[in-house]
Amino acid sequence: MTIDWQHSMPWSALAGGILVGLATALLLLANGRVAGISGILGGLLRPARGDVAWRGAFLLGLFVAPLAWLAVGAMPPAQIDHSPLLLTVAGLLVGAGTRFGSGCTSGHGVCGIARLSPRSLVATACFMLAGFATVFVTRHVLA
């Protein structure tokens, strides 16, 4: 495996990681809420009084952020090498996994590990192992 350093963006990835960490910490400290996307979206599907505004603002930020990026530079090219059917099936499996795992990778992996939650440590290890196994099988066994 080689890394294309000329087209790699380690500084923007570092900046993005820092912004995710800051947003996560601020949401937890200011509101006592965990920044798990599936939980934030799920809370909008069953709205509770006083919960809609911050959830909507958080999700709106996910759509506005790429537009803000466009104000300072071009978007990196996206290359999708798989069929829409495969991507749909993968998305449905991820959605099912968030239900079975009581949260998503952002909730468990970013927020839960930062809080040293044993459940999140196990869930994140399972996410990672499943990802490793999927890549190995699709690239080396089925290819």
Image: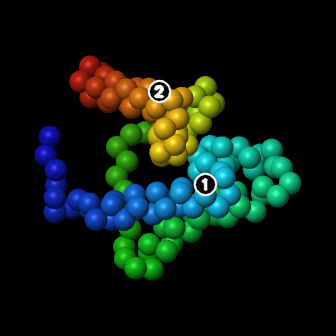
Examine the rendering and report whether any part of residue 127 can be seen: no
| The quadrant where residue 82 appears | top left
As drawn, the residue found furthest toward the bottom would be 71
Which quadrant of the view contains residue 49? bottom right
Residue 48 image point, x, y percent: 83, 50
Compared to residue 6, the image places residue 70 above or below, namely below
- Tell me where residue 12 appears, x and y as whole percent: 33, 65
User: What amino acid does circle 2 point to?
Assistant: Val
**Residue 75 in the figure: left or right of residue 51:** left
What residue appears at the point 81 percent right and 49 percent down from the top-left corner?
47
- Residue bearing the label numbered 2: 122
Helix, strand or loop at label 1? It is helix
The numbered disc on residue 53 is none
Q: Which residue is mark 1?
A: 28
Tell which residue pokes out farthest to the right in this image.
49
Where does residue 83 sit, x and y in percent of width and height? 43, 39
What is the three-letter code of the residue carrying label 1? Leu
